[in-house]
Amino acid sequence: MLSILKRTLGAVCIILAFHSKANVADLDVLIVTEHLPPYQISKDNKLIGGLVAIEIQKLMKTVLPESTIEVMSWARAHQVALVRPNTIIFSLVRTSEREDKFIWIGKVAQVRTELITLKDSELQPVETLSELKNTQIGVKRQDAVATFLNNNGFEYGKELVEIVSTMSTMRMLEKGRIETIPSNQQIIEFYCQNTGCANSDFKTLYVFKKLSEEFYLAASLGTDAKLIEKLKAEFTNLDLPIQ
């Protein structure tokens, strides 16, 4: 009798485990990101690599093996993840403004963000942001840095110039069409490897000390609890570039 009960309980556990996996697999999940080298690298709107992307792809093959990752502009990816349940997004900067708007799965990278300009620019390093008032700053739409600057008195249409992507801000800075942009040393290095410039062609004006630049894998509010549980459990197995 006891052996029959054990076999029955074992079978129930297997069925429940399979049912849980099937439920997650059957969800209408959308995974979104942007082209942000060297963290996410895309070609023709298809993800082909990147320090973070490679690891996230491993995670999704385990949790959602039939899924694909869609590459789109950051403004669109951010907006979709704000309003659509069962949406997964990376790499999303975790800020106080965003804290209650997403479900945070795990940190994928940590960087030091700076305002940079061309080496021969007349602009000089500053200690406070207020010293850069009336300076044109190229920012990515819906970006955490843009929000931070706006909250600190920099105005859209005056100091803040919205640009579609991080690589576009680099190109506009290099061509002298904008005075300064947010960036970090990894992005500059990747950009120069592909364009022929050098890190020494740029200089740092200001280092953001009060702005968290922790990149996260996150999910939209309303995302299935079983999916979140599985993502968090498998996330610990990833080898991510956290400094």
Image: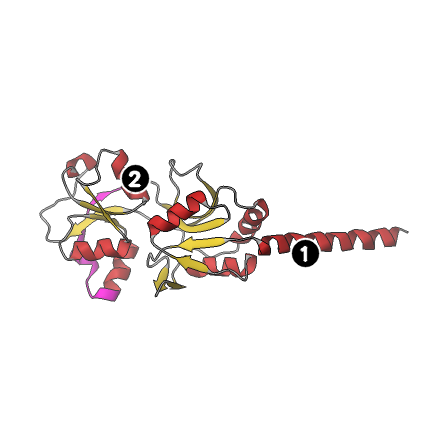
Q: Which mark is residue 37?
A: none
Who is closer to the viewer here, 132 or 82?
A: 82
The answer to whether residue 128 shows anywhere in this view is no
Residue in view at x 26 percent, y 57 percent: 167
Q: Which amino acid lies under the numbered mark 2 shown in the image of this protein?
A: Thr
Q: Which amino acid lies under the numbered mark 1 shown in the image of this protein?
A: Phe
Residue 152 placement (x, y as % from top left): 25, 34
Circle 1: is it few (<14), some (14-19), or many (20+) Cα within 10 Å?
A: few
Q: Check residue 6 for magenta coloring.
A: no
Q: What are the residue bounds of the magenta stretch?
A: 194-209
Circle 2: is it few (<14), some (14-19), or many (20+) Cα within 10 Å?
A: some
Q: Check residue 204 for magenta coloring.
A: yes
Residue in view at x 55 percent, y 53 percent: 234
Residue 38 placement (x, y as % from top left): 34, 59
Real-space CA distance between mark 2 and mark 1, rounded to the nearest whole angstrom: 44 Å
Residue in view at x 42 percent, y 58 percent: 70
Residue 157 placement (x, y as % from top left): 19, 41
In the depicted structure, whether residue 187 falls above or below residue 210: below
Q: Which is nearer the N-term, disc 2 or disc 1?
A: 1
Quarter assignment of residue 42: bottom left
Quarter assignment of residue 137: top left
The residue to which callout 2 is attached is 147
Residue contact at pointers 2 and 1, CB within 8 angstroms: no
Secondary structure under the numbered disc 2 in the rendered image: helix
In the depicted structure, whether residue 126 falls above or below residue 13: above
Residue in view at x 19 percent, y 63 percent: 197
Left or right: residue 167 compared with residue 215: left
Left or right: residue 122 compared with residue 152: left
Q: Which mark is residue 18?
A: 1
